[in-house]
Amino acid sequence: MELKEKVEKALNKVRPMLKADGGDVKLIGITEDGVVSVKLQGACGSCPFAQMTLKMSIEKKLKEDIPEVSSVKAV
């Protein structure tokens, strides 16, 4: 499975939590050194806890599922 597919599959695991709060996440890109760029959408885009959600939920899940992921950043 290609890295992009693995990332999308992992993002699909956190989407229900995000959607429950009126948000979502969109994959923007992945660098060669494993940095995943995402865009938080909906309520997540303007939430004061967005950075915590990004690191404690999204990044944590991606790193658990995909060893190649080094970090996740919002764009």
Image (cartoon, rainbow, N blue to C red):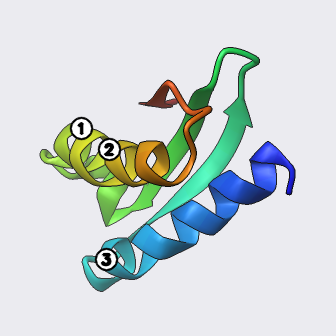
Mark 2 touching mark 1, by CB under 8 A? yes
Mark 3 touching mark 2, by CB under 8 A? no
Provide the secondary structure element on which disc 1 rests: helix
**Residue 36 in picture, x, y percent from top left:** 59, 33
Q: Amino acid at mark 1?
A: Gln
Residue placed under numbered mark 3 in the picture: 17
**Residue at 60% in and 55% down:** 26
- Note whether 33 is above or below 22 in the view shown: above
Label located before the other in sequence (3 or 1)? 3
**Residue 74 in picture, x, y percent from top left:** 45, 33
Q: CA distance from mark 3 to mark 1?
A: 15 Å
Q: CA distance from mark 2 to mark 1?
A: 5 Å
Provide the secondary structure element on which disc 2 rests: helix
Q: Quadrant of residue 33?
A: top right
Q: Which mark is residue 54?
A: 2
Q: Nearer the viewer, residue 32 or 44?
A: 32
**Residue 52 in picture, x, y percent from top left:** 18, 42
Q: CA distance from mark 3 to mark 2?
A: 12 Å
Label 1 neighbourhood size at 10 Å, few (<14), some (14-19), many (20+)?
some
- Note whether 29 is above or below 21 in the view shown: above
**Residue at 65% in and 49% down:** 27
Residue placed under numbered mark 1 in the picture: 51
Q: Amino acid at mark 3?
A: Met
